[in-house]
């Protein structure tokens, strides 16, 4: 039987997983020493000082800023370490904004013309928080991931996946220990929204880092399967249909009906342990475009018709222009 857990308290998330884009908790390469379940208490950064070295990415539309900085420069060797800090303005909450407008907020007039006027408003502390994600320590791979890059579309055949993509991934050293920490309830256990504990066909449902759980308009949940060894969409066969059906049927939470949810898998995924994304249909979540997202209902139907569909099918996806895998696939297509 699937066991439901109470929805987690409404609190800010302080860890990063997908760097907002790759994003779910998709960058939490957490070591045992770094495990922790957040609280509402005051906290400190896990380093001292932050000297900005470079703006990796910024978006006026998304109101985000990615910064690369040097930290701990006062340490004995004086060289310091690299860290990434991601700043994001949080969405408005009507129940908090309404009382502010009824009162006498601090305003500065910018201009007035007929019936239109524009002001700068200076809200109280509870309305001016900035979601701050820290990735520390970081490697050059992290810095490249967060740096804005040109993208290229590439098509990968089943043979390409077996002969090129899998060997390339095997050469990389990206840890998914943070995933196992969640599954083993060593970290973020208080944030689990729902769990089907079946070791083969069960999963854990947890809020993605992009969602502050304050409103449903940008709902974002991640279903992480308990079963280990399923890396991505390419590994799925008819054997996995019970798991996929459980996720699709049981992952609906927060009184959001199925026709208002976008439920999909990424290919390529940001980390190689099978997981499924649940987002509000009206929310333009990063990675929900046709070049990356595969609707779970369609995946299930494809496997019902052909159990080897994803081992055989040519898949199209986007890669950064400087990604070594892109060059490997492009060279294979030329030969």
Image (tube, grey):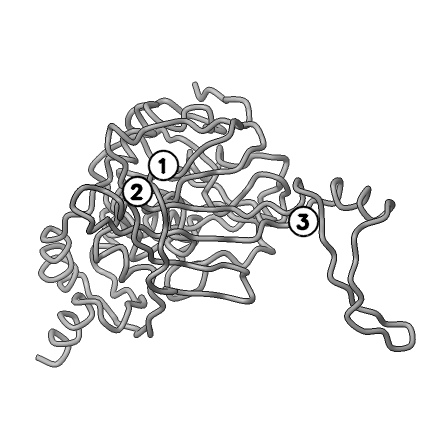
Proximity of marks 1 and 2: CB atoms separated by less than 8 Å: yes
Circle number at residue 274: 2
Proximity of marks 1 and 3: CB atoms separated by less than 8 Å: no
Side (left or right) of 45 relative to 259: left
Q: Residue furthest bottom?
A: 334
User: Which x, y percent locates residue 184?
Assistant: 30, 24
Residue at the spot x=42%, y=36% of the render? Answer: 247
Q: Earlier in the sequence, mark 1 or mark 3?
A: 3
Residue that numbered label 3 is attached to: 92
User: Which x, y percent locates residue 97?
Assistant: 76, 46
Q: What whole-number distance in Å separates the C-alpha atoms at marks 1 and 3?
A: 29 Å
Q: Which of 135 and 329 is in front in this view?
A: 135
Q: Is mark 1 on a helix, strand or loop?
A: strand
User: Which x, y percent locates residue 162?
Assistant: 12, 57
Residue at the spot x=58%, y=44% of the render? Answer: 258
Residue at the spot x=52%, y=27% of the render? Answer: 41
Side (left or right) of 171 relative to 32: left
Residue 236 in sight in this render:
no
Instruction: Kindly report which numbered mark, 2 or 3, lies closer to the viewer in this rendering.
Output: 3
Q: What whole-number distance in Å separates the C-alpha atoms at marks 2 and 3?
A: 32 Å
Q: Nearer the viewer, residue 14 or 185?
A: 14
Say if 94 sits above or below 57 in the image.
Answer: above
Decide: few, some or many residues near mark 1? Use Cα within 10 Å; few <14, some 14-19, many ≥20: many
Image quadrant assignment for residue 61: bottom right
Say if 157 sits above or below 270 in the image.
Answer: below
User: Which x, y percent locates residue 263?
Assistant: 47, 48
């Amino acid at each position: 039987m699937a066991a439901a857990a109470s929805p987690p308290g409404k609190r800010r998330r302080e860890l990063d997983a997908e760097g907002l884009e790759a994003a779910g908790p998709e960058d939490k390469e957490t070591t045992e020493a770094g495990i922790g379940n957040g609280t509402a208490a005051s906290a400190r950064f896990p380093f001292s000082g932050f000297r900005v070295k470079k703006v990796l990415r910024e978006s006026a539309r998304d109101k985000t800023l990615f910064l690369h900085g040097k930290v701990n420069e006062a340490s004995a060797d004086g060289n310091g370490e690299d860290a990434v800090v991601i700043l994001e303005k949080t969405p408005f909450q009507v129940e908090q904004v309404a009382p502010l407008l009824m009162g006498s907020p601090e305003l500065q007039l910018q201009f007035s013309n007929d019936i239109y006027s524009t002001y700068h408003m200076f809200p109280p502390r509870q309305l001016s928080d900035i979601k701050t994600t820290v990735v520390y320590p970081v490697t050059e791979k992290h810095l490249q991931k967060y740096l804005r890059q040109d993208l290229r579309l590439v098509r990968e055949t089943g043979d390409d996946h077996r002969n090129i993509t899998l060997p390339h991934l095997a050469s990389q050293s990206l840890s998914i220990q943070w995933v196992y920490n969640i599954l083993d309830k060593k970290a973020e256990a208080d944030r689990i929204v729902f769990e089907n504990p079946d070791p083969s066909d069960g999963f854990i449902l947890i809020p993605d880092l992009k969602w502050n759980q304050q409103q449903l308009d940008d709902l974002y949940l991640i279903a992480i399967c308990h079963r280990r060894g399923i890396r991505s969409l390419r590994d799925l066969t008819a054997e996995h249909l019970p798991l996929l059906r459980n996720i699709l049927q049981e992952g609906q939470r927060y009184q959001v009906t199925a026709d208002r949810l976008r439920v999909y898998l990424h290919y390529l995924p940001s980390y190689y342990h099978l997981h499924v994304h649940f987002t509000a249909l009206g929310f333009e979540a990063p990675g929900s475009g046709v070049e990356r997202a595969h609707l779970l209902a369609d995946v299930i139907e494809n496997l019902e018709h052909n159990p080897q569909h994803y081992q055989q099918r040519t898949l199209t996806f986007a890669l950064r222009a400087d990604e070594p895998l892109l060059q490997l696939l492009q060279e294979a297509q030329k030969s």
